[in-house]
Image (tube, rainbow, N blue to C red):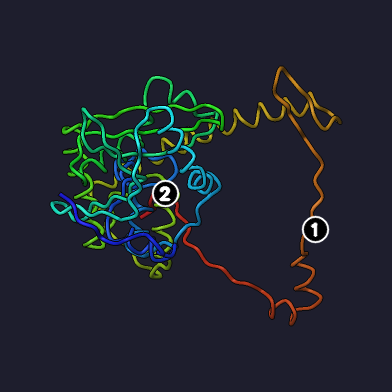
């Protein structure tokens, strides 16, 4: 059901990322489904269409890679199941936009060939592993099963550096069918260079700011009827923000009153601080008045589009 897209041995990070852009990987599946906490579908679309720079892996991802072999070896030690490394990027023959970069495969007497996936997690996320597997990892594994055609997967996790767990995940045909449909729709957006539906993420806002950076002076468009409920939604949300902002400022002011001249205060296990901070800032107004030529030489002009909604006077 799959073919080898490329070997990952000797592959540079840039080359690996380039191959990843040619399809949807397992870690992309939760983004496509809209449940990823760190990336939105529009941001993933921008990556796949080459409109978003490659992001450097953070500390958690780095240490996850470094500890992968440790998790794999501990899994074998506890289960007796050997894991074989697959240093290949796999590609589905039936759905060629689906890719898989497996941590390994293993053989089981009852389940046959299975996917192996190694994870690390912080202590703060230990509760997510108590009686289940985090949703994003379930989707990732089912994506791999869709590509490989295997009937199950083993996932092992090291939590907080001192707690080890492993679980078996059976192939879920209903979930796989849903994944294939959603990923096919998303890949259609990539191929057509048409963005998926926008959401309220910062990534979506950045995309719009970059795509429509400038406006045509004095131009006015008759908006479609669908704009009316969006305007109502915007105004209601603004009212809620103002209400909560006032509540936040009230709480802040009362806490400051309690602190008085003290820099910090405690209540139970919470620390409240109100510190004096000194900053050096360039007095641009004085510089412009006393040294106009120098000011013009180093002045940095920026432009952006201001969004607002108000009643028309026409």
Q: Which circle marks residue 309 in the picture? A: 2
Residue 210 percent coordinates (x, y) = 42, 63
Left or right: 99, with 64 as reference point: left
Specify the quadrant of the image occupied by residue 72: top left
Q: Residue at x 34, y 44 (%)?
A: 84
Depth order, front residue of 183/93 = 93
Residue 198 percent coordinates (x, y) = 33, 49
Q: Which circle marks residue 280 in the picture? A: 1
Q: Residue at x 24, y 33 (%)?
A: 152
128 lies above or below 181: above
Left or right: 156, with 269 as reference point: left
Task: For marks 2 and 1, give the CA distance.
Answer: 36 Å
Depth order, front residue of 208/265 = 265
Left or right: 109, with 271 as reference point: left
Neighbor class of circle 2 (other Cα within 10 Å; few <14, some 14-19, many 20+) is few
Residue at disc 2, secondary structure: loop
Q: Residue at x 42, y 52 (%)?
A: 203
């Amino acid at each position: 059901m799959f073919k080898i897209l490329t070997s990952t041995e000797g592959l540079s990070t840039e080359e690996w990322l380039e191959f990843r852009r040619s399809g949807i990987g397992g870690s992309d599946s939760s983004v496509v489904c809209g449940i990823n906490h760190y990336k939105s579908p529009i941001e993933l679309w921008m990556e796949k269409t080459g409109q978003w720079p490659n992001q450097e892996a953070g500390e958690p991802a780095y240490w996850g890679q470094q500890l992968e072999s440790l998790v794999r070896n501990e899994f074998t030690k506890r289960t007796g199941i050997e894991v074989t490394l697959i240093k290949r990027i796999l590609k589905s023959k039936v759905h060629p936009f689906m890719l898989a970069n497996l941590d390994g495969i293993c053989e089981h007497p009852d389940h046959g060939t299975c996917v192996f996936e190694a994870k690390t997690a912080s202590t703060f996320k230990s509760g997510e592993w108590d009686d289940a597997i985090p949703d994003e990892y379930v989707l990732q594994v089912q994506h791999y099963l869709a590509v490989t055609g295997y009937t199950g997967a083993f996932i092992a996790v090291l939590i907080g550096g001192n707690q080890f767990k492993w679980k078996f995940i059976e192939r879920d045909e209903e979930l796989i069918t849903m994944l294939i449909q959603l990923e096919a729709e998303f890949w259609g957006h990539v191929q057509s260079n048409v963005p998926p539906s926008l959401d309220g993420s910062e990534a979506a806002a950045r995309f719009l700011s970059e795509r429509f950076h400038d406006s045509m002076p004095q131009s006015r468009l008759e908006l479609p009827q669908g704009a009316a409920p969006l305007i109502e939604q915007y105004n209601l949300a603004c009212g809620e923000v103002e209400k909560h902002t006032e509540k936040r400022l009230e709480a802040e002011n009362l806490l400051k009153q309690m602190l008085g001249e003290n820099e910090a205060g405690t209540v139970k296990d919470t620390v409240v601080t109100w510190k004096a901070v000194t900053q050096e800032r360039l007095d641009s107004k004085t510089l412009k008045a006393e040294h106009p030529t120098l000011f013009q030489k180093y002045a940095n002009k920026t432009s952006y589009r201001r969004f607002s909604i108000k009643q028309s006077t026409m």
